[in-house]
Amino acid sequence: MNPEGYELRKTADGKGDGVFATRTFKVGELVMVGVIERRVNENHSHATQVSPFGYVQLGGLGSKANHSCDPNCGIRLNEAEAPNLIARRNILAGEEITFDYAMRNYSIEHFPSRCRCSASNCRGTVTGWKDLPAASKVAYDGFVAPYLIEIDRVALLHGRMSGVAGTSSSHPPKAVGGLTEHRKII
Ligand SMILES: C[S@@+](CC[C@H](N)C(=O)[O-])C[C@H]1O[C@@H](n2cnc3c(N)ncnc32)[C@H](O)[C@@H]1O
Ligand SMILES: [Zn+2]
């Protein structure tokens, strides 16, 4: 058992491996610390977004947390710009630790066609921030990577909004193009 309070197990619902709590976590508590293994040049199936145009491969069990459309964790970037997982509700020992991949990635590509999260509000497929319904964006307030909020803010200023029909690009809107470093926009 991992002394940090989680361990890797096989999921029972076809998602492969997943991370499971071995103790309780209180809402707001740090559950997992994100660790960057290496920077990668572009978005791909194992890439984690860490800024408007920056992608990394995570190390450790952080890379094994599965997606849920009703997740018990959210994202907060740490000093290394890696995504920590923070409990967005109380978590019991034995529960799978999940977050919504849309809390971290603007665009999700190369993903299984069906989401297997089993949540009552499951979206059916795993989508990124750009396709996340507005109500979910509101529900995730405080648990989302700040560059996603900034991409929406800049897009709105320029008359384009992610998640709105007709804006199906898998890249952040061009309006954010001048912002190449995360620290320029937070
Ligand atoms: C970051 S990995 C998570 C760990 C992975 N389950 C494993 O065994 O290595 C992401 C992969 O897990 C699976 N996965 C995660 N969440 C899922 C979900 N809600 N529905 C279906 N597959 C999921 C997909 O195969 C996806 O490509
Ligand atoms: Zn789902």
Image (cartoon, grey):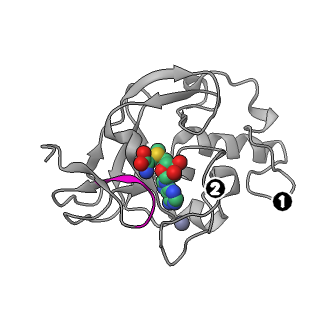
> Which residue appears at 42% of the width and 67% of the height?
13
Residue 49 numbered mark, or none: none
Residue 4: quarter of image: top left
Question: Height in image: 102 above or below 13?
Answer: above
Residue 16 covered by magenta stretch: yes
Return the x and y of residue 186 as percentages of the image width and height. Answer: 55, 32
Q: Residue at x 62, y 35 (%)?
A: 44
- The amino acid at mark 1 is Ala
Question: Residue 12: percent from the left, percent from the top?
Answer: 36, 66
Range of magenta residues: 13-19
Numbered mark located on residue 127 in the image? 2
Instruction: Give left or right: position of 170 versus 116.
Output: right
* Percent position of residue 145, x then y: 51, 43
- Label number found at residue 165: 1
Q: Which residue is drawn at 39% across and 49% down?
A: 65
> What's the distance in space between the residues labelled 2 and 1, CA to CA?
14 Å
Amino acid type, callout 2: Thr
At numbered mark 2, what does the secondary structure look like: helix, strand or loop? loop
Q: 111 above or below 172?
A: below
Asked if the magenta segment contains residue 71, the reply would be: no
**Residue 139 position (above or below residue 67):** below
